[in-house]
Image (cartoon, helix red, strand yellow):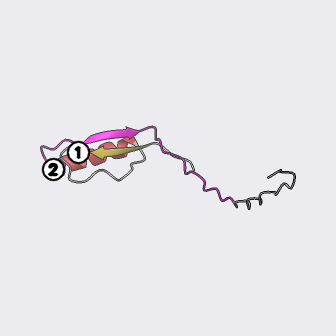
Amino acid sequence: MEHLEFWLVWSPEGERPPRHEHHSAKAAADEAERLATVYPGKSFYVLHATEMRRTADAPVEACTLLKRPEPELDDDIPF
């Protein structure tokens, strides 16, 4: 799966975390400016996502257990 860079608009005074991925810096800057106009006095930051990390899904391994062998009786034991 290919992951592409994106931009977010974030406000420290915001009520919700940012979710919309902008596909260009200009689109994010335009949105930050629009939001700043709608919400005077609040700050809107344009954030550029360049890297990501995640853990890989661990595969589930199925194993059939072998039947334990019966202990051998040794008739040469003196008792």
Q: Which residue is mark 2?
A: 39
Left or right: 60 as drawn, with respect to 8: right
- Disc 1 residue type? Ser
Local crowd size for mark 1, using a 10 Å CA cut-off: few (<14), some (14–19), many (≥20):
some
* Residue in the picture at 28% in, 51% down: 17
Local crowd size for mark 2, using a 10 Å CA cut-off: few (<14), some (14–19), many (≥20):
few
Left or right: 63 as drawn, with respect to 8: right
- Please tell me in which quadrant of the rendered image residue 16 appears: bottom left
- Disc 2 residue type? Tyr
| Element assignment for label 2 | loop
Q: Can you give x and y, in whole percent of width and height, for residue 40 in the image?
A: 13, 46
Question: Is residue 44 in the magenta section?
Answer: yes
| Element assignment for label 1 | loop
* Residue in the picture at 38% in, 41% down: 25
Q: Can you give x and y, in whole percent of width and height, for residue 13 in the image?
A: 17, 46
What's drawn in magenta, residue-wise? 37-63
Instruction: Specify which label sits upstream in the sequence, 2 or 1.
Output: 1
Question: Is residue 54 in the magenta section?
Answer: yes
Q: Which residue is mark 1?
A: 11
Residue extending farthest to the left is 41
Q: CA distance from mark 2 to mark 1?
A: 10 Å
Residue 51: numbered disc: none
Q: Can you give x and y, in whole percent of width and height, for residue 70 in the image?
A: 77, 60
- Please tell me in which quadrant of the rendered image residue 33 appears: top left
Magenta stretch: helix, strand or loop mostly: loop
Q: Say which of 50 and 33 sits in front.
A: 50
Evaluate if marks 2 and 1 touch, with contact meaning CB atoms under 8 Å apart. Answer: yes
Q: Say which of 11 and 67 sits in front.
A: 67
* Residue in the picture at 36% in, 46% down: 27
